[in-house]
């Protein structure tokens, strides 16, 4: 326990062992208890971290379960193929859109226009002096061109203008010269780019002296023979409640079908069951009373007597077995979907046909059961949020255990200092004994030598 090992050198007594034994007798029990407290604290911190992680993962799932838009999506198919896999259309949102079948033609995609100058000698050529004004839809900006400005300078002024939000200027260098090109990044006829000049010397780089190499156009679709246009490739409410993006044209009418995406809803419900069971199994492991006396290294049993964990477990079961009275009879509980509570607290899809039937015939009621104002998903997300929020149950508890760890570390420092002081006092006490015994040993040796010498003389 000490780096000093000189006690007993003078007397020949094994005072180091005596000191070590006395120090150990006083402090070993305290260190053993402190070490046990630190190990217990580490297990508790680890267990709460595991609890947080599982509650958080479950929260993500029930967050979707409580969100009507994520729980009950619409599935769009084009000629029987999921629109996600189509080269024609991407679904963006389908809020409140009804089911239906439509004839769809994508006649054109939206495009922006492009202007190209005649060829100049080089990108270092100068043009003239004056102002160039760029107009596209409701936006416009102006740059000033000096007599010394080259095509490169003009390009840079256009691209650097603080008022420019959509015009891009570039130079293409050919084998015989250079060409200035303007392009508007905003699509649609209404956003067609025009360039005017304040002086005739700049006409060669204004619309009047440039060639339109690409015209602006709107996206156009025909739905059941009815035409809809958009200045972008996104259509909102062309079919009321539906927003989609066209990504390619069609050569012949295609069949667009909108139907309830029961499969994705079923996948989410199954994910809910799986994550619920993972969470319950983790709670059972962490709060196992049989492991509470000596928790495993993985934290099993470390939270056996935590009231907050027991409360969470009870509330979880209460919600899972609750009846939502505001829902129609036959669609008021998880049991009505074929989901049953097992003896170990986990859920099981005991009757899959019940869920299939509910999704096929009561899709909106399934949504209400989970995502209604008092729905099961809504209750569960409120429960998990209350535990996960800043200064919530888990956050507060973890702070308490973290503070406890700091206290234990401080206690360890104080105990080290106290033990060092106690050992120093023992050394001081035994130093006097060592000195006294050494003195008498020397006297005894002197007398012994004296008698020995006298015997030899005789």
Image: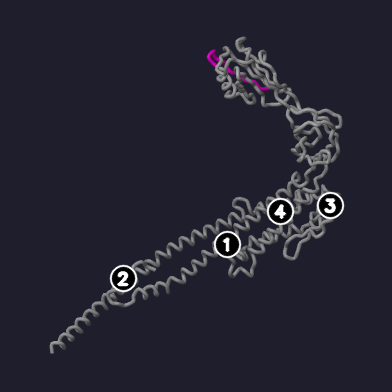
Q: Earlier in the sequence, mark 3 or mark 1?
A: 1
Label pair 4/1, CB-CB below 8 angstroms: no
Q: Secondary structure at mark 3?
A: helix
Task: Name the residue beneath numbered marker 1.
Answer: 44
Task: Name the residue beneath numbered marker 4.
Answer: 380
Q: In which quadrant will I find the C terminus?
A: bottom left
Measured in 3D between alpha carbons, the distance from the residue under mark 3 to the one under mark 1, in whole angstroms, is 43 Å
Q: Where does residue 194 sit, x and y in percent of width and height?
A: 67, 18
Measured in 3D between alpha carbons, the distance from the residue under mark 3 to the one under mark 4, in whole angstroms, is 21 Å
Measured in 3D between alpha carbons, the distance from the residue under mark 2 to the one under mark 4, in whole angstroms, is 68 Å
Q: Where does residue 326 sit, x and y in percent of width and height?
A: 81, 51
Q: Is residue 235 above or below residue 259?
A: above
Q: Secondary structure at mark 1?
A: helix
Furthest residue toward front: 175
Of badges 2 and 4, nearer the viewer stands: 2
The magenta stretch is: 137-149
Q: In which quadrant will I find the N terminus?
A: bottom left
Of badges 2 and 3, nearer the viewer stands: 2
Q: Earlier in the sequence, mark 2 or mark 4?
A: 2
Label pair 1/2, CB-CB below 8 angstroms: no
Q: Return the mark for residue 358.
A: 3
Q: Residue at x 71, y 26 (%)?
A: 187
Label pair 2/4, CB-CB below 8 angstroms: no
């Amino acid at each position: 326990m000490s780096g000093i090992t000189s006690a007993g050198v003078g007397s020949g007594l094994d005072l180091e062992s005596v000191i070590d034994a006395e120090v150990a007798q006083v402090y070993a029990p305290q260190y053993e208890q402190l070490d046990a407290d630190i190990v217990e604290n580490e297990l508790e911190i680890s267990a709460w971290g595991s609890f947080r992680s599982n509650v958080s993962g479950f929260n993500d799932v029930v967050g979707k379960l409580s969100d009507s838009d994520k729980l009950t999506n619409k599935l769009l198919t084009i000629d029987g193929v999921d629109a996600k896999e189509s080269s024609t259309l991407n679904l963006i949102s389908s809020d409140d859109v009804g089911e239906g079948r439509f004839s769809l033609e994508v006649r054109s995609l939206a495009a922006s226009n492009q202007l190209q100058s005649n060829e100049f000698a080089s990108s270092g050529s100068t043009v003239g002096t004056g102002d160039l004004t760029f107009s596209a839809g409701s936006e416009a900006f102006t740059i000033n061109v000096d007599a010394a400005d080259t095509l490169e300078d003009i390009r840079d002024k256009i691209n650097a203008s603080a008022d420019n939000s959509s015009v891009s200027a570039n130079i293409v260098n050919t084998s015989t010269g250079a060409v200035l090109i303007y392009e508007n990044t905003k699509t649609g006829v209404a956003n067609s780019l025009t360039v005017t000049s304040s002086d005739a010397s700049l006409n060669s780089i204004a619309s009047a002296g440039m060639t339109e190499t690409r015209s602006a156009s709107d996206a156009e679709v025909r739905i059941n023979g009815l035409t809809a246009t958009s200045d972008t490739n996104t259509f909102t409410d062309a079919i009321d409640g539906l927003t989609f993006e066209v990504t390619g044209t069609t050569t012949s009418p295609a069949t667009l079908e909108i139907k309830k995406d029961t499969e994705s809803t079923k996948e989410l419900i199954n994910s809910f069951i799986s994550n619920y069971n993972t969470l319950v199994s983790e709670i059972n492991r962490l709060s196992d009373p049989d492991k509470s006396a000596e928790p495993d290294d993985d934290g099993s049993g470390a939270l056996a007597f935590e009231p907050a964990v027991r409360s969470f477990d009870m509330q979880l079961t209460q919600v899972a077995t609750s009846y939502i009275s505001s829902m129609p009879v036959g669609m008021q509980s998880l049991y009505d979907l074929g989901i049953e509570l097992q003896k170990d607290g986990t859920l099981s899809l005991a009757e899959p046909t019940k869920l299939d039937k509910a999704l096929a015939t009561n899709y909106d009621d399934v949504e209400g059961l989970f995502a209604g104002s008092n729905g099961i998903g809504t209750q569960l997300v409120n429960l998990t949020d209350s535990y996960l929020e800043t200064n919530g149950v888990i956050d507060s508890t973890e702070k308490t255990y973290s503070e406890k760890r700091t206290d234990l570390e401080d206690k360890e420092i104080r105990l080290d200092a106290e033990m060092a002081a106690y050992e120093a006092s023992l050394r001081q006490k035994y130093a006097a004994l060592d000195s006294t015994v050494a003195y008498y040993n020397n006297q005894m040796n002197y007398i012994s030598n004296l008698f020995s010498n006298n015997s030899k003389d005789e």
